[in-house]
Image (cartoon, rainbow, N blue to C red):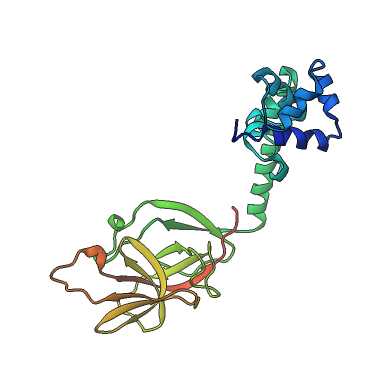
Amino acid sequence: MADSYFGKNLKYLRTKNKLEQRDIANLLNKKSVGTISYWEQGKSEPKHEILNFLADYFEVSVNDLLNSDLANKKRTVNIGDLFRRLTRENKIKATTYVQQLLQNQSDELAARRQAKQLFKIPVYQHIAAGLGWGKEQVDGVVDYFYVEEEPPKFDFAMIVEGDSMEPEFHNGEIALFRKASQVDDGGIYAVDYQKHNYLKKVYQDDEATRLVSINPAYQDIVIPVPDYEDVSYEDIPYVIGKVIASYPTVDQ
């Protein structure tokens, strides 16, 4: 009971609805005002059936009544709870109405697709490199995304993650790449390193590979040239493609 919000919530809901403690007492078969006061002070709590009654009366869940700070909680509508309180006849009406809304929504989306051509781009979870190019290098299709402009010919696409390449590349955009075997210092590439794909500016010399963000808030990733006689594949940075375009995604 020490961690319960019931007393605070009861007082909040009562005053919000401009009720006195006597009004609550009357609602509960004339329980004494002292009992209501004890509840609001957190000194005791009512039985489960009274909790259910109060939750229904104030249109909240019992769980929220006991465990949420309702005074500081953004109110949301629990559709499931509302539906369960409907009569059988009204449940049928509500279900029919929702089904019609879904059909209308589907029709509207189809009309939008016809009015504006969208271009579909597959994005993979991980692109590997170093062993040639083939299906064995792709770790599962994440999803298909859509852009409004017809993209140029590309070899693979990645979703930009985070803000490390802003302001040029934004979180959630699609970046398109062509395979690249050579690196121009300062060019922007996709790099496979330690089972992660990075979108970075790349600088290479005899001592290290540096992956550099455009956003100055991020430090460079410096990868020393390894001893190739004693190193695992994933510890070697592989440049797998050079960025050729990027687009914001749109809903299909």
Left or right of 163: which side holds 48? right
**Which quadrant of the view contains residue 68?**
top right
Q: Nearer the viewer, residue 98 or 51?
A: 51
- Which quarter of the picture shows residue 195? bottom left
* Quadrant position of residue 249: bottom right
Residue 149 percent location from the top left of the image: 57, 66
| Residue 116 in picture, x, y percent from top left | 64, 58
The residue closer to the viewer here, 209 or 108, is 209
State whether residue 114 appears in this view.
Answer: yes
Q: Residue at x 36, y 58 (%)?
A: 126
Residue 181 at x, y = what percent? Answer: 30, 75
How many marks are shown on the rendered structure? 0
Q: Is residue 251 above or below residue 13?
A: below
User: Residue placed at 39% from the left, 76% from the top?
Assistant: 220
What quarter of the picture does the N terminus occupy?
top right
The percent coordinates of residue 134 (x first, y second) are 29, 59
| Outermost residue, left side | 229
Is residue 95 at least partly visible in the picture? no
* Position above or below: 31 against 218: above
